[in-house]
Image (tube, helix red, strand yellow):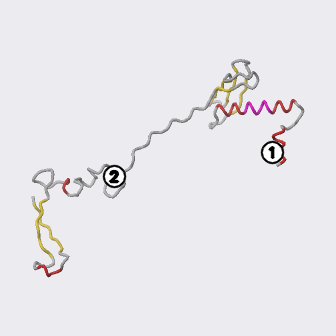
Amino acid sequence: GSKTFERASHFGSSRGLGSRAPFTAAVTGRCGARPCAASRYPWGGAVSGAGRGAAGMGRRRSRGQAPSKPKPKLDTMFDCLFCQTGKAVEVKMVRLEQIGFLKCRVCAVTFQSRTTYLSEAVDVYSDWVDETEEANFKKDGDDVPAPLKAAAAK
């Protein structure tokens, strides 16, 4: 398998054969005597980019996807405000009803609050802490807790 090509001379007509001189080049590759796509390109592959990965001609190779890191787990067990027992308060979320339940295993204190699809167990616990602080300040005779008065004064 040989083909005839015409090559343009860059030296003008002073080469003796004119500006164009025919020459023959064998276009055979790994396939034996017949021409094949593997020999058309310097890297030995066809247009699809064989031998270069999936990058193709002139493209950067894409890196493999990095393995995702596991999300940090948030606590569902907290310290009780009333009996001071550590990890005794358990929070359960009922996502379909949009309610969070909180219960202490030792002193049987219960609390429930409204949740959203973004809420977590720590949000229900913080709502409980806020409600108990507010109730304690109202019990002492203040209408508004001292930290809120200080914030309102600024």
Q: Main secondary structure of the magenta part?
A: helix
- State the SS at label 2: loop
- Quarter where residue 79 is shown: top right
Task: Give the side of residue 110 with respect to residue 59, left or right.
Answer: right
- Quarter where residue 121 is shown: top right
Categorize mark 2 by other alpha carbons within 10 Å: few (<14), some (14-19), many (20+): some
Judge whether 132 appears above or below 105 on screen: below
Residue holding disc 2: 55
Q: Disc 1 marks which amino acid?
A: Ala
Categorize mark 1 by other alpha carbons within 10 Å: few (<14), some (14-19), many (20+): few
Q: Residue at x 15, y 50 (%)?
A: 30
Judge whether 117 appears above or below 12 on screen: above
Where is residue 52 shown, x and y percent of the image?
A: 29, 51
Closer to us: 118 or 72: 72
Range shown magenta? 127-133
Task: Give the side of residue 109 with respect to residue 141, left or right.
Answer: left
Q: Which of marks 2 and 1 precedes in the sequence?
A: 2
Q: Which mark is residue 151?
A: 1
Q: Disc 2 marks which amino acid?
A: Ala
Task: Give the side of residue 78 with respect to residue 45, left or right.
Answer: right
Judge whether 123 appears above or below 1 on screen: above
Q: Which mark is residue 17?
A: none
Where is residue 68 shown, x and y percent of the image?
A: 47, 39
Judge whether 27 appears above or below 12 on screen: above
Question: What whole-number distance in Å separates the C-alpha atoms at marks 1 and 2?
Answer: 59 Å
Residue 128: in magenta span:
yes
Q: Residue at x 20, y 53 (%)?
A: 38
- State the SS at label 1: helix
